[in-house]
Image (cartoon, rainbow, N blue to C red):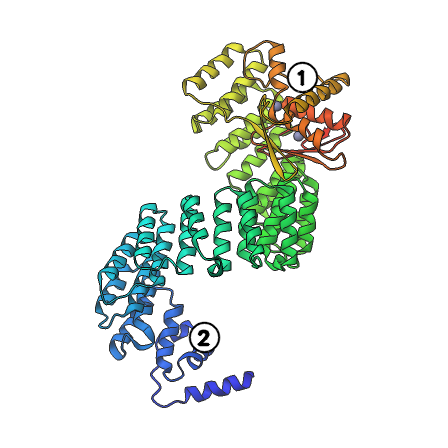
Amino acid sequence: MFRLFHATLKTCMLLPHQPKPLTYCSLLSQTSLQFHAISTHHFDPFLSTLLLHLKSSSSVSICRIIHAHVIKSRDYGDGFIGDQLVSCYLKMGATQDAYFLFDEMPKKDFVSWNSLVSGLSKIGQLGECLSVFCKMKSDSELKLNEFTLLSVISACVTENACGEGYYVHCCAMKLGLVFKVKVVNALVNMYGKFGFVESAFSLFSGMPESEKSIVSWNSIVAVCAQNGMPNEAFNCFDMMRVNGFFPDDATMVSLLQACENFPLGRMVEALHGVIFTCGLDENITIVTTLLNLYSKLGRLNNSRKVFEEISKPDKVAWTAMLAGYAMHGRGKEAIEFFERIVREEGMEPDHVTFTHLLSACSHSGLVKEGKYFFRVMSDVYNVQPRLDHYSCMVDLLGRSGLLNDAHQLIKNMPFEPNSGVWGALLGACRVHRNIDLGKESAENLIALDPSDPRNYIMLSNMYSAAGLWNDASKVRTLMKNKVLTRNPGCSFIEHGNKIHWFVVNDYTHPDSHRIHKKLEEVMKKIQDVGFVHETESILHDVDEEVKIDMITKHSEKIALAYGLLVTNADMPLVIIKNLRICRDCHNTVKFVSMVEKRTIIIRDTKRFHQFSDGFCSCGDYW
Ligand SMILES: [Zn+2]
Ligand SMILES: [Zn+2]
């Protein structure tokens, strides 16, 4: 086979009237060049050579050289080289060259116009793209087809241009192209991207069932996924399967995306099954997303199983697994994993790898190890520390009470500290009750982002805890004057294929009566074994009893009570919270894990807390 290939190649080279080789021939290997010549334009090797160079050209000057050759010895119509030159100029951003050439071309046919529209669309020149489109529309000799429309729709999507999108939709209707399946798919996708879900659905439902392709189904699943409608995405997926379509990579990417914000255990497990039965487990992006989802759900063991099943994990998969360990505060395992992938698999760690590794050390209180990796990342691996790495280090030092070291590190940083760095120090000051440094951190944070209520709350709480009521009240007045309100806290828990949401003092759940009864019962049980409320994190300057009443109705406590009522005792109880868990709830869950003999996992904005036997995996620092 190989010999035959070379034999043909020689024959080709010996053809009479062979043109002089181009001066920039060295840009490409001879072999691939001639192979292309044989395969596509055996009748005209020089033209093939030009086309091939055009295809692989990486600069405007090469386009211009080819352009010059065409002017000298060719016709723009030969092998559509004129149209391809237009596309190539546009790809390089040389719009003027493209226009000059386009005007120069004597015979412009439909393909030429489409090349121009498509090239302009790809570089996001919506205005230009539309103006060429309108010229085409007004030219009676040119009949617009679906390809023209697809280019213009794609430009509208890229530029998020709703008005123009509507206009193109109207044009499609007038031109009678709205029945073309590709056009409808593109419009469905466009409306989805604009967030006009109803329009997308009405177009999709208007399509005859027999016309719908896998792309049509994928488009509507993607619309739901992108617009935060996981249930609808799964319904469309079911319908798709009823209609005899098998999911492909694109379907799965959308479904996994749908789960990203509301990871429901059962949905993720179901997807896991589909991925394997449909043979989509070869797609590393899909399995890595699955691994991530399990990790977000608090099921690190499942993540690990998925990882072990990847035949050739890449850097993204390794990093995702490391991130899982970090998020779950498994410092030792993260370090072992890091050493394994670097030593055995030869992975070259980058700044993302070190962010996860340092954050794992910090979440597990591994000060010595953290310091070591912070040093070797630049000394051995040549990765210069960035702000994220400094935040992790400040967090790590602060956590161990080395507040002055953390402060020193901030002062010696080669760049301006950001809110992540100051936030880490403020968190440490709160835990170790260092008012002076805490004040400095909070002031810096407020200066960096005066609109973030969390910083005022944290500073005010610190003052309150130290009994500095006047200062606390000043901060609160400042916050009120700026009309800053905290996001309402809410927690959710999965049960019976549904997500159950709870906010503070929530009585809206149908089972509310039973839930609050259970909560009282559990609180009583833990108080009997020595639990005492910690009211310091309550902002309001109110009586102790009122404070306790407010604190016992936090959303995660209500979710916990519901979880205890409805979930199986041998399964971990997983709660997801949109804010950081407060100290009192953290303590409550520790006691509940002990008296109820349950493993309870709470994911807050910072990390996972895994409670069992009265302890939390975070070691009471978060
Ligand atoms: Zn709480
Ligand atoms: Zn914890």
The label shown at residue 533 is 1
Q: Are marks 2 and 1 in contact (CB under 8 Å)?
A: no
In-image side of 596 versus 197 (left or right): right
User: Residue 393: x, y in percent?
Assistant: 58, 35
Q: Nearer the viewer, residue 360 or 339?
A: 360
Task: Give above or below for 233 relative to 475.
Answer: below
Mark 2 or mark 1, which has the lower sequence index? 2
Task: Give above or below for 535 relative to 346.
Answer: above
User: Residue 62: x, y in percent?
Assistant: 33, 68
Task: Give above or below for 214 relative to 525.
Answer: below
**Tag 1 secondary structure:** loop
Q: Quadrant of residue 586?
A: top right
Q: Quadrant of residue 313?
A: bottom right
User: Residue 114: x, y in percent?
Assistant: 32, 64
Q: Residue at x 57, y 30 (%)?
A: 406
User: Residue 198: x, y in percent?
Assistant: 43, 44
Amino acid bearing label 2: Ser
Label 2 belongs to which residue? 29
Q: Nearer the viewer, residue 167 or 226?
A: 167
In-image side of 411 versus 50 (left or right): right
Q: Quadrant of residue 101?
A: bottom left
In-image side of 522 versus 176 (left or right): right
For the residues labelled 2 and 1, the Cα–Cα distance comes to 75 Å
Q: Residue at x 56, y 49 (%)?
A: 255
